Amino acid sequence: MAALAFVALALWTAGGLFLNPFDRVSAHNPNDQIWFEWLLEHGAYTVRHLENPLFSERQNYPFGVNLMANTSVLGISIPLAPITMVFGSAISYWVFLVGGLAGTAYACYHVFSRHLVTSKVAAWLGGAVIGFAPGIIHHANGQPNFSTHFLVPFLVLYALRLGRPGRVMRDGLIMAGLVVWQFFINQEVLLITAVALGVITLVRIRDVWPNGPRILGSLGITAVVAGALLAYPMWFQFRGPQSYRGLPFEFHSWGEDLAAYVTFARDTLAGDAYVEKVIGHTEQNTWFGWPLVLVVLAAAVLLWRRSKVARIATIAAGIFVVAGIGPEVVVNGKETGIPGPWALISSGHVPVLELLQPTRLTMVVVGVVGLLVALSWDALRGMSSGPRSAGSDATEATGEGDTGEASGRVRAPWGSALRTVPVARKRAFGMFAIAMALVPITPWVMPTMVAPKVPDFIVDDHWRAYTPAGYTVLPVPVPNNADGIWTLRYSAAGRQEFQIPHGYFIGPDENGRGWYGPVSRPTTYWVNHVAKTGRIDGRDDDLVAPTDEMKVGMKQDLVFWKVGVVVIGPHPHQRELKMLWDQVLGPGKYSHGAWIWDVRWLTVAGNP
């Protein structure tokens, strides 16, 4: 029943795509959704053709794309390959999205219900808060890799259970498997989880110390097995073809606005898109709303002495709240001038840290909020039932007992000031407060929009007649990270059976530094300028004819890309784009929903 409820909630949240997954995309982040659909097709393509999944020549011809140096999600795309091959990437993306949300919530519920609380309702609420947190839903708008965390609860569980007598080998191997799988889903989440576990270990070092040799033994097994399996992918990521150094922007400067914690997120019942104009278009990782913040703070205080798990989680949350601030404290969209912890690395050239966004460290806070909600509800339930509650400090989870504070006795579980209040009244008030705090952050249906149609020329494989082996298809606008993202769908719709120039990815610039998209050629600018403005010759004036220099340059690029056919599908400026190519290549031909130019004569000759 818990699983079905989570699936139903995920279906509700992703309902905009469910109605028409082939023609609709996220209205908030359509570009990334198209990228992930392409990645799902990449997984299916590598399975179908038994090719190297770490690299793709289906974008950015003739250089290709290093998938390990991008968000490859091979841990999802490979398992979903059968669905993608049968139904297409639009359906597998929808499965990815719904399964990620529901799977994350259920994984938290599973761990909570078996190792932390006795109440199934408490475990369900905790799982729902984490799996459908405002920040998780925000990422689900086009970035399902950041809303898919079904392995994280088990990573945390097994990390806390390391050191159990007789299970050194087994726990080490299980941890290795979880690490490797999470590595191929989202490396950043794996890194954040590892940092969080390191902080938790330091907080409870006195409890961990006696089991140190066994813990180190399990970690050694994890390091050897996971290291052996990940050595080549990591080398490929940092030293393989089309790898790069650093990132296009200083992501370490993206800190969390402190006012965001008490703000209702855009995609929640109480949310309003207008607030983004005040705080800014952040990732909304911590937009819990003020009622839930008050409830969680109260729970942290009242459970402090009762539950060791709550104490450790609260301390960890406080550390990550500070770590997520970034280089400067920002409140309600305004810089305060007060330096944050990341000001110490403002140069942005510290290895590993330069790849992190401070705001994403607050995902640890999301987990703590869900945990405290579960512990609070369980404590309230235990006030009248008497047995173990509030996670009797998860002996199974942490490998230790508590100090006797976790018994379910009613004696002052909520502080001496409340002793005179009848138990039933305290219980009812507490549960009501939790419920009322969760209602405003109930996720709303994520908005979608109609995507431009991919012409039948691509969908029905008519391109094959113009693209022999070794030739590429050039969709217009030219696929890139800005104006030409929509035509990347041509590659996904064609099951990646043809190569395309340029694309949507992060690759090296002329100096080997990371950059969004390829090193652009003149045709990309000229064509995509027309697509964006409806004007030719790169000038913001009336429509004019392309210059001779433009004509020569565009033909040279067609030769460089070894284009077999140029394709213009439905587009707001299709008429102007056709006029441009007509003047460069001669009159185009209308075929199966697209204007096309057969340019094999040009690319074979190689002489514009």
Image (cartoon, grey):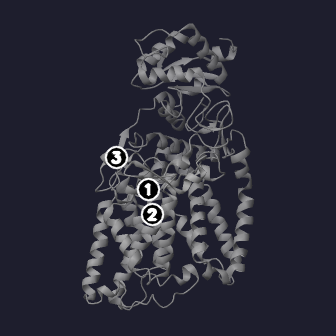
Q: Residue 102's quadrant in the figure?
A: bottom left
Q: Which of the image's four quarters has the C terminus?
A: top right
- Which labelled disc corresponds to residue 366? 2
Q: For the residue labelled by badge 3, is the local secondary structure a helix, a strand or a loop? A: helix
Q: Amino acid at mark 2?
A: Val
Mark 2, Cα crowd under 10 Å, few <14 / some 14-19 / many 20+, is many
The disc placed on residue 278 is: 3
The residue carrying mark 1 is 285
Q: Is residue 329 above or below residue 199?
A: above
Look at the numbered disc 1 and give the secondary structure of its residue: loop
Decide if residue 487 is in sight here. Answer: yes
Q: Residue at x 60, y 27 (%)?
A: 520
Mark 1 vs 3, N-terminal side: 3
Q: Residue at x 40, y 65 (%)?
A: 129
Near-viewer residue (19 or 278): 278
- The answer for how far apart the CA atoms under marks 2 and 3 are is 23 Å
Mark 2 or mark 3, earlier in chain = 3
